[in-house]
Image: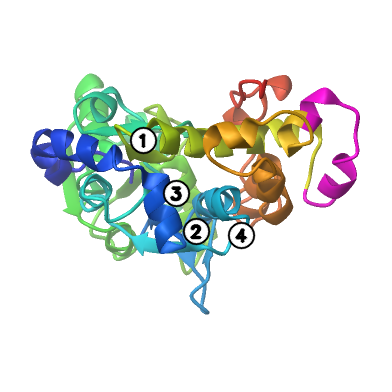
Amino acid sequence: MLDRSWKSVALGAAFVMGSAVAGSAATLDTVKSKGFVQCGASTGLAGFSEPDDAGNWKGLDADYCRAIAAAVFGDATKVKYTPLTAKERFTALQSGEVDVLIRNTTWTMSRDTSMGMIFAGVNYYDGQGFIVKKSVGVSSAKELNGATACVQTGTTTELNLSDYFKTNGMEYQPVVVEKDDEAIAAYEAGRCDVYTTDASGLYASRLKFANPDDHVVLPEIISKEPLGPVVRQGDEQWLNIVKWTHNAMLAAEELGVTQANVDEMKATENPDIKRLLGADGTFGESLGLSNDWAYNIVKQVGNYGEVFDRNVGTGSPLNIERGLNALWTDGGLQYAPPIR
């Protein structure tokens, strides 16, 4: 479900200049005047961003939106969500309909250089995979020659699928749909042999199947999909706020600062923790925020490990291992520059 919208690519060049102008209009001032952060989200992906029965948004990406609100307002509830399809997301960001896009979106070169956008970090390292029914008797993606494949249009997934089959000298028939739920429904209905998207999305989708154990995620990961928050180019202050929200959550986990102990940690003599929580220096002010910006993030939303665990990790129905998303100290890729 990842990522390259044909609509946004077509409109990208036209929006580059306009988005730079929109970005230079000081997003932080606009957000403060509205009283909330408008966050572009998915149309519903378990573990990442989806509303519950009461309309409350939950998930890793949804929590990142709340963390930005906590940093800006000291109140994580001051956020509104705009559900966006893969086709709609970039236009919504470029036009100013949303302040930040946090919607399982892959960081690519073209998106950084030709669409008037810039990525603020990677909040989930992912890769594209395949799911099939066990009854098909396939144990490897290399056995999918001649298969029909359900895939979401306007995504890097669609492009990666073509590249993978071409590289491996295999044929396939795409069944292209616009929304993720439509792809899942088409796969369950037997319109295709295999469904492909980010591996995280496959595990999330399998939970929705009538009989999840009848389906298997194949072992191959065919792409790099670094997912993260996106903002418009031309507003370095807003970029820094979103970037350092992510970094603060990582730093808090590395330093052992949690929702439960953050108040106790405020009294520490550890200089790294003092800078993180605003007891030393004026790092919040340099962002245009209060000096307790990171304290508010951790107190109201949690550190990165807590957010990961409850939404997609071992504390969630998805039960995904940290893997590449572990801290660098644990063999993963998540690494925050120092607050200094």
Q: Is residue 211 above or below residue 24?
A: below
Q: Is residue 207 above or below residue 94?
A: below
Residue 99 % position (x, y): 36, 50
Residue 136 % position (x, y): 37, 49
Report the Cα–Cα distance between label 3 and label 1: 16 Å
Mark 3 highlights which residue? 202
Q: First in sequence: mark 2 or mark 3?
A: 2
Report the Cα–Cα distance between label 2 and label 1: 18 Å
The three-letter code of the residue at mark 2 reads: Ala
Q: Residues within 10 Å of mark 3 (few under 14, many from 20)?
A: many
Q: Nearer the viewer, residue 132 or 162?
A: 162
Q: First in sequence: mark 2 or mark 1?
A: 2
Residue 17 magenta: no
Mark 1 highlights which residue? 106
Say if residue 159 shows up in the picture.
yes
Mark 2 highlights which residue? 46
Q: First in sequence: mark 3 or mark 1?
A: 1
Q: First in sequence: mark 4 or mark 1?
A: 4
- Camera-side mark, 3 or 1: 1
Report the Cα–Cα distance between label 4 and label 1: 28 Å
Whether residues under marks 2 and 1 lie with C-beta atoms below 8 angstroms apart, the answer is no
Whether residues under marks 2 and 3 lie with C-beta atoms below 8 angstroms apart, the answer is no
Whether residues under marks 4 and 1 lie with C-beta atoms below 8 angstroms apart, the answer is no
Q: Residues within 10 Å of mark 2 (few under 14, many from 20)?
A: many
Instruction: State the residue at coordinates (66%, 24%).
Output: 339
Q: Nearer the viewer, residue 161 or 122?
A: 122
Q: Quadrant of residue 250?
A: top right
Say if residue 146 shows up in the picture.
no
